[in-house]
Amino acid sequence: MPNIEMYGFSEEKAAEVANRIQYLFEGKSYTDDYVTTAVWSDVTDHENEAQPFLRLVTTRSMYLFDMIKELRKLGFDIEVMILNRFIPKEK
């Protein structure tokens, strides 16, 4: 389950970014697989300028590079963290 974490955004901006991600991923084969997580934090550089960013946390998957391509359209820095394993909850 790919998780797109949003750091350094206000609640309002995080909701806007999540909606834009939903639009970008609409109709993709992974539309039902990803989640978004807003992490309430202040992210600043050495000059105290806000530097919000996205972090894509996922296992290696066949759609990893497509997700990155789509997320780049948002204009934010992106970190990619590859998980060794994802264990889904039991149904």
Image (cartoon, grey):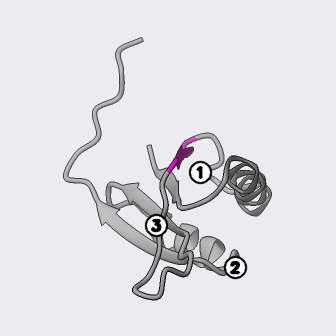
Residue found at the very far top of the displayed protein: 91
- 2 or 3: tag closer to the N-terminus: 3
Q: Amino acid at mark 3?
A: Leu
Residue 27 seen anywhere in this rendered image of the structure: no
Question: Can you say which quadrant of the picture contains the N terminus?
Answer: top left
Residue 73's label in the rendered image is 2
Residue at mark 2 to residue at mark 1: CA–CA distance: 17 Å
Q: Secondary structure at mark 2?
A: loop
Q: Quadrant of residue 56?
A: bottom left
Rendering coords of residue 28 (x, y %): 69, 57
Pointer 1 or 3: first along the chain: 1
Q: Which residues are magenta?
A: 33-40
User: Which x, y percent locates residue 68?
Assistant: 53, 73
- Asked whether disc 1 touches disc 3, contact meaning CB atoms under 8 Å apart, the reply is no
Picture coordinates of residue 70 (x, y %)? Answer: 65, 72
The answer to whether residue 16 of the structure is visible from this angle is yes
Q: Is residue 45 left or right of residue 8?
A: left
Q: Secondary structure at mark 3?
A: helix
Q: Residue at x 49, y 61 (%)?
A: 42
Q: Which residue is mark 1?
A: 30
Residue type (three-letter) at the residue carrying disc 2: Lys
Image position of 63 (left or right of 80): right
- Locate residue 81, reporting x and y percent: 32, 64
Position of 35 relative to 9 (above/below): above
Q: Are marks 2 and 3 in contact (CB under 8 Å)?
A: no
Give the quadrant of the C terminus: top left
Looking at this rendering, what residue extends furthest in the bottom direction?
Answer: 47
Q: Nearer the viewer, residue 90 or 39?
A: 39
Main SS category, magenta section: strand
